[in-house]
Amino acid sequence: MCSIVNRLKPALAYTLRLQTTGHLRKVPAHMGPGLRTSKQPLESVIIRPYCARMELGKGPFFRQLFESVSSTYTYLLADTESMEAVLIDPVLETVDRDLKLIEELGFNLKVAVNTHCHADHITGTGQLKNRLFGMKSAISKHSGASADILLSEGDKISFGKHCLTVRETPGHTDGCVTLVTGDQNMAFTGDTLLIRGCGRTDFQQGCSRRLYESVHQKIFTLPPQCLVFPAHDYKGQTASTVGEERRFNPRLTKSVEEFVDIMTNLNLPKPAKIDIAVPANLVCGLHEV
């Protein structure tokens, strides 16, 4: 049956969904992938897979979201059986958008986790906690920030049958973590590793040598096909892979000494919101919000 669906034209494929019973069920074509009416049950919605593993029911639901002012990516992952979900790096200004999507898809948001204490935007975690009873906030214990869950190396954030494993990757800040799916097919690298770049190291306890070691020891040791999803991109790119970054990252393919020299001479301007964002994010985004 799967082979039959795969041979269908893309336009027609959008109107069909392989049910767990093995039968094809038609969905109104005008609905499009991932959309439904307010009365339409989630099980009749086409959830477009990000890869073959999700299509086969082995990977989590995945959605990449974007906030344009700070060029921040927010990531929604969920287990489509238990409907438990995790949100990575929410932004204050897009909380309404995120909640609407979560409600439309019928997910139960368990945890909102920040990959580090951000300096360029205020996290949406505080507002999410105010509006979703029982949701927990999470951040590294080394960040200096308050949260319900303080993360350490090897900790797991579970949602249904899936989980994210914490890898401590300091360097951009002391509290940076990379979150890796259980199958090591996806890594959410925060500001530690960007697409063909990396986070700056000239403020917030930044250290170029530590960042270099973090990437090479904790991220570049993942399988080469592992997808890399950063917290930001400023050039319209959405994802990379560990293998690509190991080959083509113009900074992290250098020696450690060359890397330190590059980072020392970036001469970047101070983030516009740092004096507001950091104090707010240290208290889970509730400072004067």
Image: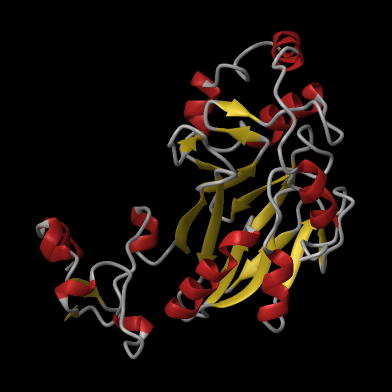
On the image, the x and y values in percent for residue 84 come to: 56, 76
**Outermost residue to the bottom:** 39
Q: Is residue 155 left or right of residue 70?
A: right
Q: Is residue 65 left or right of residue 160?
A: left
- In the foreground, 227 or 23: 227
On the image, the x and y values in percent for residue 73 come to: 54, 49
73 lies above or below 100: above
On the image, the x and y values in percent for residue 236 come to: 43, 36
- In the foreground, 118 or 134: 118
Which residue is rendered at x = 53% and y = 62% of the image?
A: 76
149 lies above or below 270: below
On the image, the x and y values in percent for residue 136 come to: 74, 72
Q: Which quarter of the picture shows residue 212?
A: top right
Which residue is rendered at x = 78% and y = 23% of the image?
A: 208
Q: Is residue 212 visible?
A: yes
Q: Which quarter of the picture shows residue 287?
A: bottom right
- In the foreground, 227 or 90: 90
Quarter occupied by the N terminus: bottom left
The scheme the figure's colours follow is: secondary structure
Q: Which quarter of the picture shows residue 174?
A: top right
Which residue is rendered at x = 38% and y = 57% of the image?
A: 53
Which residue is rendered at x = 76% and y = 52% of the image?
A: 154
